[in-house]
Amino acid sequence: MPLTPLIAFHMACAIAATLTGAIALWARREASPLPWVHRIAGYGFVLLMLATAISALFIRDFKLPNWAGFTPIHLLIPVTLGGLALSFWHLAHRRIAQHRSVMRKLYLGSCVVAGLFTLLPGRLLGNLLWQGLA
């Protein structure tokens, strides 16, 4: 799959969300008195994850096992959108521990694990990485 502007946008949003999410999680540790950094980074993370999930809707791959161009990794789209909605619902009801849990799981699943899957051979980033190392 070639690097189209849509894929470049999706990749940039995903990488930025991974970095911003790490800052948001770091700034809200028990020992860190930086709630304003957490709030700014958190809103940035949410916006970047929304952009990542929505742009993923338009990225199709008909070579891998798919259903109308949607591959198994596209299952992260409803998981991500649902996780973001659930996280804000917990915040609105002042359930901070549940909010923290949902956001940690969302970060690990949608950023870290999905990011590692993109490095597999046969994926765009995986091919760039492994060909560059060879």
Image (cartoon, helix red, strand yellow):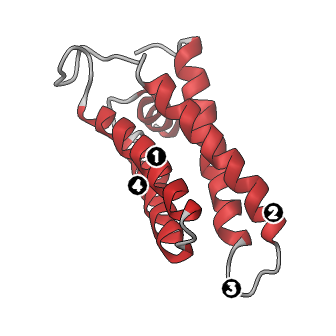
Earlier in the chain: of badge 4 and badge 1, it is: 4
Report whether 14 appears left or right of 112: right
Residue at the disc numbered 1: 115
* Disc number lying in front (4 or 1): 4
Number of numbered callouts drawn: 4
Q: Is residue 20 above or below residue 12?
A: below
Alpha-carbon distance for marks 1 and 3? Answer: 27 Å
- Please state the horizontal and vertical placement of residue 48, each as a whole percent of the image: 62, 38
Earlier in the chain: of badge 3 and badge 4, it is: 3
Q: Residue at x 44, y 41 (%)?
A: 81
Report whether residue 120 is seen: no
Residue at the disc numbered 3: 30
- Please state the horizontal and vertical placement of residue 99, each as a whole percent of the image: 52, 66
Quadrant of the rendered image containing residue 105: bottom left
Query: Is residue 9 or residue 117 the one in the foreground?
Result: 9
Q: Quadrant of the N terminus?
A: top left
Alpha-carbon distance for marks 2 and 3? Answer: 14 Å
